[in-house]
């Protein structure tokens, strides 16, 4: 796939700067399995669900991961804390530093009455860092950090919960899994009342939310690994739905990556090439890290319906959506959304994309029933 196929023009006035109120009053563009496009509102979502559908949401909660630190020369450095460094036992994290050019290992940056120590430069402005003094990184961020809104959103929300899903629970993301921002507790209750199930997985969103694809050939891009866990209860619910040939509806591209990491796609060989590790058993659940990179041509083995936002051009998120909905069909839908003045990106409107039901016969993961 050529990079220009992921490119399109979004008028700046269509980039949403704040969420609508209530959340589920945003617009919804439905791409049906037959190829039709329907324009409706998100609170109309139950019309496009079936009793027995299993919605899989990502319950990761966004860290107040952005802090502004001061060098001893007086200059300011923006730090975006991404995730714990897996190879370290101590509270060492990966953080994206801007500007990074003049930083050196061993340097101390000041944030209030605390200091951030730079240990080692990794790549692309990412550093291994730790926080001096009592308490770990997360308590430090809760005191000193702010929500890491994308650069196209120009002010912090009045209520920080606007950038959290209503079911957010597991603290650890550097950005919101934004497809879930449209759900209200009332809508979730309505979905359950009609006979659908809802279960949660956790994938902590990391650096690649912020990093566009730059390689001319999309498949040459590499994405960083992100950590996920699936509880025993959720794994049983997903396995049960697959055995009973009920639809799996992924709420967001992050849920897609977890489900496809667990159940395959193209074959286990393709997963190894993509960098997705075999899931480890966690007391009846599973967890691990995934570098699964989904591009057009990928064969989906788990997900039947995708609920997602309108994504930035030239990103792995858009490549995944085009892999699911078809390159031409998604491009046409985006053009129509622009013409109809849809709102784009994190606080924007939503899509529901169906595909013909395909059950690849992949065995359930683990021993859950």
Image: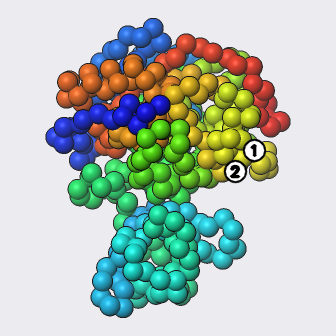
Asked if 68 appears above or below 215 in the picture, the reply is below
Q: Nearer the viewer, residue 284 or 319?
A: 319
Question: Which residue lies under the disc numbered 1?
Answer: 278
**Residue at figure coordinates x 23%, y 56% from the top left:** 154
**Residue at figure coordinates x 24%, y 35% from the top left:** 9
User: How far apart are the alpha carbons under marks 2 and 1?
Assistant: 8 Å
Query: In what element is the residue under mark 1?
Result: loop
**Residue at figure coordinates x 40%, y 73% from the top left:** 100
Asked if 324 appears above or below 84 in the picture, the reply is above
In this orientation, does residue 190 appear?
A: no
Q: How is colour applied across the structure in the image? A: rainbow
In-image side of 205 versus 158 (left or right): right
Q: Determine which quarter of the picture holds residue 37.
A: top left
- Earlier residue among tags 2 and 1: 1
Question: Which residue lies under the disc numbered 2?
Answer: 288
Asked if 40 appears above or below 55 in the picture, the reply is above
Q: Nearer the viewer, residue 108 or 131?
A: 108
Q: Determine which quarter of the picture holds residue 47.
A: top left
Split into 4 quadrants, where in the image is the C terminus?
top right
User: Do the numbered discs 2 and 1 sit on residues whose CB atoms are within 8 Å?
Assistant: yes
**Residue at figure coordinates x 28%, y 37% from the top left:** 344
Query: In what element is the residue under mark 2?
Result: strand
In-image side of 216 versus 75 (left or right): right
Disc 2 packing (10 Å; few <14; some 14–19; many ≥20): many
């Amino acid at each position: 796939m050529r990079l220009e196929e992921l490119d399109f023009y979004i008028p700046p006035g269509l980039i949403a700067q704040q969420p609508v109120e209530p959340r589920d009053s945003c617009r919804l563009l439905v791409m049906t399995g037959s190829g039709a496009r329907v324009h409706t509102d998100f609170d109309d979502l139950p019309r496009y669900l079936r009793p027995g559908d299993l919605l899989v949401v990502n319950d990761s909660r966004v860290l107040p991961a952005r802090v502004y630190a001061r060098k001893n020369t007086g200059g300011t450095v923006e730090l975006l804390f991404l995730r714990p460094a897996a190879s370290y036992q101590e509270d060492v994290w990966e953080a994206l530093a801007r500007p990074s050019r003049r930083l050196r290992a061993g340097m101390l940056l000041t944030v209030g009455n605390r200091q951030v120590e730079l240990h080692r430069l990794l790549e692309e402005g990412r550093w291994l860092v730790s926080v001096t003094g009592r308490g770990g990184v997360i308590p430090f961020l809760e005191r000193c950090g702010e929500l890491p809104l994308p650069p196209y959103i120009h002010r912090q929300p009045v209520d920080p919960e606007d950038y959290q899903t209503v079911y957010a629970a597991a603290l650890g993301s550097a950005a919101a899994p934004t497809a879930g921002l449209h759900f209200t507790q009332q809508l979730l209750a309505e979905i359950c009342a009609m006979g659908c199930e809802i279960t949660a997985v956790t994938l902590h969103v990391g650096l690649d939310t912020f990093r566009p694809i730059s390689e001319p050939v999309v498949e040459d891009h590499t994405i960083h690994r992100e950590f996920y866990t699936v509880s025993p209860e959720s794994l049983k619910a997903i396995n049960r739905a697959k055995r009973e040939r009920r639809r799996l509806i992924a709420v967001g591209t992050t849920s897609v990556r977890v489900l496809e990491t667990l159940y395959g796609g193209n074959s286990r060989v393709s997963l190894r090439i993509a960098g997705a590790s075999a899931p480890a058993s966690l007391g009846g659940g599973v967890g691990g890290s995934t570098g699964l990179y989904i591009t057009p041509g990928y064969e989906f083995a788990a997900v039947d319906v995708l609920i997602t936002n309108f994504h930035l051009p030239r990103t792995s998120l858009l490549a995944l959506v085009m892999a699911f909905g078809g390159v031409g069909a998604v491009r046409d839908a985006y053009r129509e959304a622009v013409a109809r003045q849809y709102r784009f990106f994190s606080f924007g409107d939503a899509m529901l994309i169906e595909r013909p039901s395909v059950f690849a016969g992949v065995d359930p993961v683990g021993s859950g029933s």
